[in-house]
Image (cartoon, helix red, strand yellow):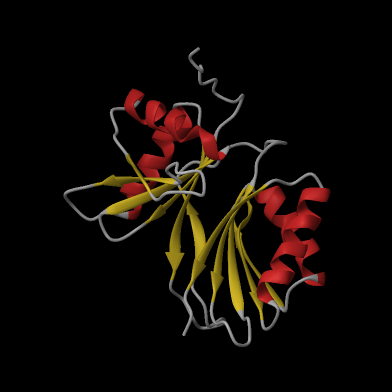
Amino acid sequence: MSLVHTAPDQIFALVRPFGSNVLQIHAWPETSLVDVVVALRRQGLEARPTGIDANGQPNALLTFSEHDYSENDLARFVDALNSAGVAAYGYTLVHDHEFIDVDLFRRLGSVPPPHADAPIFMNVLQLDDIDERGSIFAFGDAHKLSLLAERAAAHVDSVDPVEGMKGVDSVHLSFGYDFLVRTGALVDALNEAGIEVHLRVTRAVQ
């Protein structure tokens, strides 16, 4: 008996630089990476799977260029995904540290319309094991990010939203203690509010 893959009604993707000439793509639902590859091929673009999750499946896609990706290149890539029916959120780093001592992210490319099923993509960065400090960078639908910024105050030590032309672009959250426990409580609170979370944990223990 063969299993037939059925694409979900709507696929969401997060697109960010992963080096000067590489873009990294995460998908939601997480099982829809193959659908993102198909969408890219319809636009004449290629991507290869990378990383392995707990089930032995790829957890991201990478796409390479012979030349460095400019902001315009990234924007066109995001536009192509959106044109192919994938709700793609593209981002680039903001390096202005005049008012805050962390890297923040702003949008590039076309912005998908609001969608009830849009997830929040979270990049969770554990900074140390002893004090259990950490940060979260959150991306996705502007309305969902606005709700995150409102609800996160009860669970984190600081909330730094990046405002864009169409609402909240991204949100940075910082934790000074009990990072993993408090992150879990925040995700539970979001799920209870009907907001799905795509969680990716990175350890940067010093």
Q: Is residue 31 left or right of residue 142?
A: left
Residue found at x 41% / y 27% = 39
- Out of 158 and 3, give the one closest to the viewer: 3
Q: Quadrant of residue 58?
A: top left
Residue found at x 50% / y 27% = 85
Residue at the front extreme, as displayed: 1
Image label count? 0
**Above or below, 43 relative to 132:** above
Residue at the top extreme, as displayed: 1
Q: Is residue 96 left or right of residue 178?
A: left
x and y percentages locating residue 107 in the rendered image: 50, 54
Q: Is residue 203 left or right of residue 184?
A: left
x and y percentages locating residue 75 in the rendered image: 39, 46
Q: Is residue 185 left or right of residue 10?
A: right
**Above or below, 13 relative to 125:** above
- Out of 172 and 190, give the one closest to the viewer: 190
- Out of 147 and 28, give the one closest to the viewer: 28
Residue at the left extreme, as displayed: 66
**Above or below, 175 relative to 44:** below
x and y percentages locating residue 137 in the rendered image: 57, 64
x and y percentages locating residue 134 in the rendered image: 60, 76
Residue found at x 69% / y 36% = 117
